[in-house]
Amino acid sequence: MEVEREPSEEPPPTMMEEVEAEAIPVAKEPPRIHRLDQSVVNRIAAGEVIQRPVSAVKELVENSLDAHSTSINVVVKDGGLKLIQVSDDGHGIRYEDLPILCERHTTSKLSEFEDLQSIKSMGFRGEALASMTYVGHVTVTTITAGQLHGYRVSYRDGVMEHEPKACAAVKGTQIMIENLFYNMTARRKTLQNSADDYPKIVDLLSRFAIHHINVNFSCRKHGAARADVHTVATSSRLDAIRSVFGVSVARNLMKIEAADDDVSSSVFEMDGFISNSNYIAKKTTMVLFINDRLVECTALKRAIEIVYAATLPKASKPFIYMSIVLPSEHVDVNIHPTKREVSLLNQEAIIEKIQSAFESKLRNSNEERTFQEQVCGKLSI
């Protein structure tokens, strides 16, 4: 028996109609755009520049090199989270500059944007020290030539916490960062849970030490009597490599050079040391300096690995130390927050010529080794 509907009753909605009704977006007001508070902006920027403890060490060591230091000492506690201390014997910081030392975009290395085309210093943005004060507690002790005493001052969020205090000091500057990332919980936990940064810091100092051979470097854990990096200024690059990476690496290296002065394609000079066919390692070690700046170049690394794989077919990975010098205006150093990467004018042509130099050197080395083995084989019969 059918139930009669009242004339005014509407039939119940079908399932399709219900889905369509749910799919109709409810009109919402667009979110308001607002200006971020400056302290939020600064902390976000700081997290980009100082990504982990080794980033802070790199920035501080480069500042020491810019100050013409001949001795740089690094002390680290808890992988750099508890303490990073970098001491140098450079020219120091003027008393009158201390109030703005850790403000963002204050620097002694750059005045105009055009200066970037001829920049010789490692730093130039005036961001690193400021960034450290937004994610850690920074204390600076410094003395300049001719002064009877130095000054010590602490910074937080880019500003001095107190007036500089007179103190005893040795030549140069000491910068101490404590409790790094104390206010960035996720970053700090991630770094505490991962293998600490100390091995990365040791590797970083090792790389600086084999390039800046006129500087004494040391790096040790806080409280340790023995330094894990300890180099003395030398006139021999190979001696520096031997001191840092060991005899087994140094004895299997060959000197390599390449250059080009063709203005239409590429202008550069390259020299370095590369491993021969006797060198055995499970991963590639590539130490690259461009105009004295420690950088990475994935394309160049890949090109060299291809040459090694083709020329020396065994699975061992190479050791490469390379220093490339180009006109300053041919290098863009301002493409990465940490200045770890650079962009080169005529990069493809430069890589191709360096790859060709490696190929030639390795092939000649391989042929000499084969010849020597054949001669030795005949003599032993």
Image (cartoon, rainbow, N blue to C red):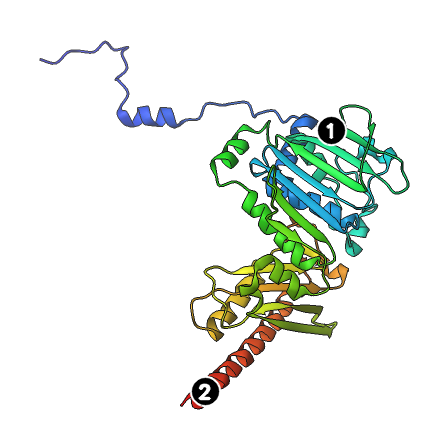
> Is residue 240 rendered to the left or right of residue 97?
left
> Can residue 319 be seen here?
no
- Residue 39: name its quadrant: top right
Q: Position of residue 18 (x, y in %)?
A: 31, 23
Quadrant occupied by the C terminus: bottom left
The residue drawn where x is 74% and y is 49% is: 71
Residue that protrudes farthest toward the left in the picture: 1
Number of other residues with Cα within 10 Å of mark 1, as a class: few under 14, some 14 to 19, many 20 or more? many
Location of the N terminus by quadrant is top left
Q: Give the alpha-carbon distance from disc 2 to disc 1, as whole Å.
A: 67 Å
Give whichever of discs 2 and 1 has the lower sequence position: 1
Judge whether 78 appears above or below 114 on screen: above
Against 43, is 218 above or below? Answer: below
Numbered disc 2: secondary structure: helix
Q: Is residue 308 visible?
A: yes
Residue hosting label 1: 155
Q: Residue at x 69, y 41 (%)?
A: 86
Q: Could you say which is closer to the camera, residue 148 or residue 49?
A: 148
Indicate the secondary structure of the residue bearing disc 1: strand
* Residue in front for this viewpoint, 186 or 37: 186
Amino acid under label 1?
Answer: Tyr
- Name the amino acid, label 2: Gln
Residue at image point 63% right, 27% down: 33
Q: Residues within 10 Å of mark 2 (few under 14, many from 20)?
A: few
Q: Position of residue 154 (x, y in %)?
A: 74, 28
Residue 326 placement (x, y as % from top left): 73, 64
What is the tally of numbered marks visible in this picture?
2
Most extreme residue toward the right is 146
On the image, numbered disc 2 is attached to which residue? 374
Is 300 rendered above or below residue 146? below
